[in-house]
Image (cartoon, rainbow, N blue to C red):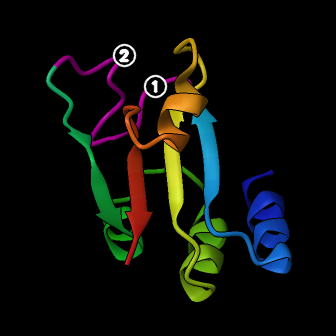
């Protein structure tokens, strides 16, 4: 489904792709299993792929990179989380160049 969402975002010329997940961004490890996992505020597409962070499949990340569309990863469990991220005050990880 990640690749389908990325393809649709590219076709529509979206400004960003928002990915709601179980956690509030991209981490170095699974934060539910590794207590000292580091949450990243910003990453490049290359860093996500090189570190094998597995936030999305590689095809989706590459498609967003090739089309210059940032990926914003946020928690779907935070009440008002999407609205906060859209307003620029929410907790998230942004993946871009």
Distance from Cα at disc 2 to Cα at disc 1: 9 Å
Q: Residue at x 50, y 44 (%)?
A: 73
Q: Nearer the viewer, mark 2 or mark 1?
A: 1
Q: Which residues are magenta?
A: 22-35
Q: Secondary structure at mark 2?
A: loop
**Residue in front for this viewpoint, 64 or 30:** 64
Q: Position of residue 83 (x, y in %)?
A: 58, 31
**Residue in front for this viewpoint, 1 or 67:** 67
Label annotation for residue 32? 2
Q: Secondary structure at mark 1?
A: loop
Q: Residue at x 85, y 78 (%)?
A: 11
Residue 11's place in the image compared with 48, above or below, is below
Furthest toward the bottom, the residue is: 66
- Residue of label 1: 23
The answer to whether the residue labelled 2 contacts the one labelled 1, judged by CB atoms less than 8 Å apart, is: yes
**In the rendered structure, does residue 52 fall within the stretch colored magenta?**
no
**In the rendered structure, does residue 28 fall within the stretch colored magenta?**
yes
């Amino acid at each position: 489904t990640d690749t389908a969402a990325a393809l649709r975002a590219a076709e529509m010329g979206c400004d960003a792709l928002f990915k709601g997940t179980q956690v509030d961004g991209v981490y170095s490890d699974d934060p539910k299993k590794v207590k000292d996992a580091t949450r990243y505020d910003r990453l490049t597409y290359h860093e996500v792929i090189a570190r094998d962070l597995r936030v999305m499949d590689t095809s989706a990340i590459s498609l967003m990179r090739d089309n210059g569309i940032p990926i914003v990863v946020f928690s779907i469990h935070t009440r008002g989380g999407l609205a906060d991220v859209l307003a620029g005050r929410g907790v998230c990880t942004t993946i871009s160049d």
